[in-house]
Amino acid sequence: MKKRKFKISDIIFVVFILLLIIPQTRTPIQVAVNKLKVAVWSPSIEDEEDQNGVTPFEYAVVDLQGNSQNISVGKGKVTFISYWATWCPPCIAELPGIQDLYKDYGDKVNFILLTQEEPERVQRFIDKRGYELPIYFPQMQAPEVLQENSIPTNYVIDATGKIIIKETGAADWNSKKIRNLLDDLIINYSD
């Protein structure tokens, strides 16, 4: 009978599987895997003929402090919409890039990060990570063209309501490609 030798890759595989089985390690592993994806995956710009539009509207939301407000979408300002959750590993992986983008474009672009979770849970999550993001809770049904069943789903909508990017899954929102796109969208509308 021939004795089998274990390779280091076999041992790593077994450890990885065991870590996935242990509930406390699942989310950190999934976030780490999604961060690897975020590092190389830049959102795709829709082809011109595939770009849908959203009729300009006011998004009725409530912020983390409980204040109701309406945020214009497609009414003269570029908008970034993100549907996300604190329990979603791809969402967690892409939030640092969204935070960096918001830090530089928050005064030029409407950022609307939407979640259906309890405000207290979201506040703890944001505080723990030190994010300063405009997080809201929707108070209305989104227009049909913005309805998606998976998270994260993110949109970049130009100042007239044209959906330039619709990306489902984790992506690098702080890439040079996205920054150039936002610069172009902001400049083109202000001309």
Image (cartoon, helix red, strand yellow):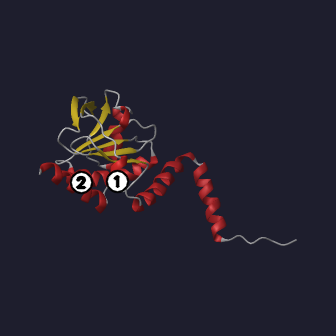
Q: Report x, y in % for residue 38.
A: 41, 57
Q: Is residue 153 above or below residue 35?
A: above
What amino acid type is highlighted by mark number 2?
Leu
Of 114 and 165, nearer the camera is: 165
On screen, residue 45 versus residue 17, left or right, reads left
Q: Residues within 10 Å of mark 1 (few under 14, many from 20)?
A: some
Q: Report x, y in % for residue 27.
A: 49, 48
* Camera-side mark, 2 or 1: 1
Q: Could you tell me which residue is drawn at 45 percent across and 60 percent down?
A: 36
What amino acid type is highlighted by mark number 1?
Ile
Q: Outermost residue, left direction?
A: 191
Q: Residues within 10 Å of mark 2 (few under 14, many from 20)?
A: many
Residue position for label 1: 45
Quadrant where the N terminus lies?
bottom right
Residue 182 has which mark? 2
Of 26 and 45, nearer the camera is: 45
Element under disc 1: loop
Element under disc 2: helix
Q: Quadrant of residue 149?
A: top left
Q: Report x, y in % for residue 43.
A: 37, 54
Q: Could you tell me which residue is drawn at 56 percent across and 45 percent down?
A: 23
Q: Could you tell me which residue is drawn at 35 percent across and 38 percent down?
A: 122
The mark nearer the N terminus, 2 or 1, is 1
